[in-house]
Image (cartoon, rainbow, N blue to C red):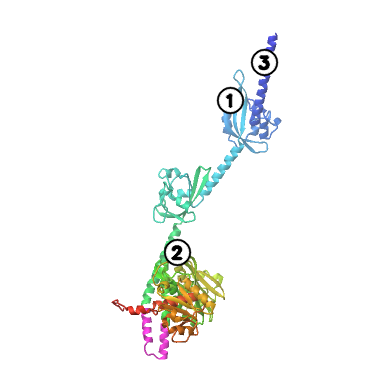
């Protein structure tokens, strides 16, 4: 009996322990899943806390009621027919259901319904274990709605949209199918692996590149540039598209690229027609200009011949008017011809060696008489740091400066000022960037009219044409020519106070034997010191900038001992110049003064300002190039060449 009693107690303890473990297990399950039991008719006999929590019903509301209490009326009745048919056969039913809580909200559960049998294998109740999947279902629906919305946007987009994933097409919109005639993406991919297979390869359009370089790599590399694709639509008609591509990286694994094809065929065709019309118009202007210019030159030539005959005062007046009018008309025709050349991209720049000091000064001097007629202060200031020899197109450069200077003179009233200035703003051993400025104190240009002045046949105001004349082509041509040189013509102006036009051009340096330093290499430059410190500082600074070697002597020195046959003397005093004249020829003495009226001296009037350097440079260069300075040994050596001269 003791043995049985002890064994019973042992089994009882074991049972209690297992009961406790089972109770804890049920408690754990009850805390995470929704559990309910119903009788064979579907009336609820048990509902755990999770069921009450998610449904919002109390225990007394649930027990004894049909499970339909949480049924969503929108659920298809066939679902429940299949459910009952399954569990009544003794099988387990698995599925997802949408249930309705007491407050009317919908929640979603993943359900497993088990039949429970008695010893005779009769179904006595049903056990339902459910998992709350509301968040998952709602997230999925939100994603599906977002995807549906995105697809709707894509399909209503007029432009063709193609999405590639890891270089493979993953999606296209309806516009793609409408344009190219494919039924769906599968039918397209059965023939092609890449949208680029539809490209027509021509110069200036995207190429059919697949591997290793993709066709859209160039777009991703240069996103701000406009890229074009030429493609054939379902009607076998060539269409032109502007193409944009944007890359997206998802989860650091999938690389998506979104491509947009915008049909610009009609726009391009209209543009091409306009360009063809412009070319035709420009060609007409060019041909007419050539045709008109030939007889105009004849009129001008014979008018000039007529001027040289014996004429009465009245006849001379008439011939002068014919001559002036003909020149004006010829200038207009030349402007039109230049404008048509620029419009047709027929302007080709020469690349010859020029001396900017000489070239710019010559251009400046051409218009000096016009400035003097209006009593203008007409000055130039050339930066002495400019290279003495550069590669450029002298003719076109002269044309730009002449246009700007003539405009400045035209629009500047009596006693005003016109300035031509150059300034070196950047340089290295082989190139130099020079800023050109043409400034005046004229009528100025209103700020709102500044953009208009560079357009062909335009001036700041209609009254300007009536008052000052002109075609309005000068500034347009100048701006276009500056652009051909690689610069940009810019303007600053204050109405009533004046205008400044400026542009920057880069020049390549060249080496030429005619630069001033080389021409003066055989001469000794001597400066006679003077009490005028301004003169001494200015002349020293100028000669240093031209890399010319020189030395100073005093007025008290013995000139006969110091001066040689190859000496060139610069002096500020005419009396000193006359003393040196007894030793050196006139050509080797430069007297810088405005009070010299001595016929035995070469005197030049040079103002000591920023223009002094360029004036002195051109004066010396002119003397050297005209051979007014010739050494005695050159005379003694004579000329031995046999020359053959052609006069045309």
- Along the line of sight, which residue is nearer the eye, 391 or 34? 391
For disc 1, the neighbor class at 10 Å (few under 14, some 14 to 19, many from 20) is some
Separation of disc 3 and disc 2 at Cα?
A: 108 Å
Whether the residues at callouts 3 and 1 have beta carbons within 8 Å, the answer is no
Range covered by the magenta-colored residues: 295-323
First-in-chain label (1 vs 2): 1
Residue holding disc 2: 429
Q: Is residue 133 left or right of residue 348?
A: right
Distance, label 1 to label 2, CA atoms, is 101 Å
Image coordinates for residue 480, horizontal then vertical, percent:
45, 68
Give the residue displayed 36% in from the left and 85% down from the top.
Answer: 305
Indicate whether 139 appears above or below 337: above
- Coordinates of residue 409 in the picture (x, y in percent): 50, 78
Q: Which residue is mark 3?
A: 11
Left or right: where does residue 630 sit relative to residue 153? left
Q: Which residue is mark 1?
A: 88
Q: Is residue 434 magenta?
A: no
Which of pointers 1 and 2 indicates the residue nearer the eye?
A: 2
Q: Which badge, 3 or 1, comes first in the chain's sequence? A: 3
Q: How far separated are the C-alphas under marks 3 and 1?
A: 39 Å
């Amino acid at each position: 009996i003791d043995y049985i009693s002890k064994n019973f107690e042992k089994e009882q303890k074991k049972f209690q322990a297992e009961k406790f473990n089972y109770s804890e297990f049920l408690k754990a399950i009850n805390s995470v899943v929704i559990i309910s039991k119903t009788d064979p008719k579907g009336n609820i006999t048990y509902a755990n806390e999770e069921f009450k929590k998610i449904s919002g019903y109390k225990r007394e509301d649930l027990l004894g009621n049909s499970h339909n209490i949480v049924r969503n009326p929108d659920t298809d009745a066939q679902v429940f027919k299949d459910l009952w048919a399954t569990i009544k056969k003794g099988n387990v039913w698995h599925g997802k259901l949408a249930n309705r809580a007491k407050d009317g909200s919908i929640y979603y559960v993943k359900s497993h319904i088990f039949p429970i049998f008695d010893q005779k294998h009769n179904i006595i109740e049903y056990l339902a274990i459910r998992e709350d999947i509301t968040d998952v279902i709602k997230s999925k629906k939100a994603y599906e709605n977002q995807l549906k919305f995105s697809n709707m946007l894509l399909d209503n987009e007029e432009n063709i949209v193609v999405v590639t994933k890891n270089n493979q097409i993953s999606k296209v919109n309806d516009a793609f199918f409408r344009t190219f005639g494919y039924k769906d993406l599968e039918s397209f991919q059965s023939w092609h692996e890449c949208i680029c297979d539809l490209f027509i390869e021509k110069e200036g359009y995207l190429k059919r590149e697949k591997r290793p370089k993709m066709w859209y790599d160039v777009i991703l590399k240069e996103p701000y540039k406009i890229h074009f694709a030429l493609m054939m639509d379902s009607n076998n008609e060539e269409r032109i598209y502007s193409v944009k591509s944007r890359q997206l990286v998802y989860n650091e694994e999938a690389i998506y690229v979104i491509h947009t094809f915008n049909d610009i065929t009609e726009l391009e065709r209209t543009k091409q027609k306009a360009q063809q019309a412009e070319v035709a118009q420009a060609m007409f202007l060019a041909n007419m200009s050539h045709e008109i210019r030939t007889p105009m030159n004849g009129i001008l030539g014979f008018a000039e011949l007529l001027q040289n005959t014996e004429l009465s005062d009245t006849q001379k007046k008439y011939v002068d008017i014919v001559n002036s009018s003909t020149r004006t008309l010829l200038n207009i025709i030349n402007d039109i011809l230049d404008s048509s050349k620029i419009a047709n991209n027929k302007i080709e720049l020469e690349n010859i060696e020029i001396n900017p000091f000489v070239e710019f000064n010559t251009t400046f001097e051409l218009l000096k008489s016009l400035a003097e007629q209006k009593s203008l202060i007409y000055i130039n200031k050339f930066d002495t740091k400019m290279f003495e020899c550069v590669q450029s197109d002298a003719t076109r450069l002269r044309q730009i400066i002449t246009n700007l200077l003539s405009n400045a003179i035209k629009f500047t009233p009596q006693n005003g000022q016109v300035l031509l200035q150059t300034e070196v703003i950047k340089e290295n051993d082989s190139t130099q960037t020079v800023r050109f400025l043409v400034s005046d104190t004229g009528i100025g240009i209103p700020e709102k009219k500044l953009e208009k002045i560079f357009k062909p046949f335009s001036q700041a105001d209609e009254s300007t044409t009536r008052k000052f004349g002109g075609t309005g082509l000068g500034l347009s041509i100048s701006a276009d020519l500056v652009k051909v040189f690689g610069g940009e013509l810019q303007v600053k102006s204050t109405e009533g106070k004046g205008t400044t036009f400026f542009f920057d051009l880069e020049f390549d340096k060249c080496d030429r034997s005619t630069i001033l330093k080389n021409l003066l290499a055989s001469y000794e430059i001597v400066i006679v010191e003077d009490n005028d410190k301004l003169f001494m500082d200015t002349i020293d600074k100028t000669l240093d900038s031209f890399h010319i070697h020189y030395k100073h002597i005093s007025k008290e020195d013995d000139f006969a001992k110091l001066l040689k046959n190859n000496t060139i003397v610069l002096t500020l005093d005419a009396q000193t110049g006359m003393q040196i004249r007894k030793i050196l020829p006139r050509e080797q003495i430069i007297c810088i003064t405005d009070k010299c009226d001595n016929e035995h001296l070469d005197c030049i009037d040079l103002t000591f300002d920023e223009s002094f350097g360029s004036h002195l440079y051109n004066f010396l260069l002119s003397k050297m190039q005209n051979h007014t300075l010739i050494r005695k040994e050159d005379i003694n050596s004579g000329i031995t060449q046999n020359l053959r001269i052609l006069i045309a």
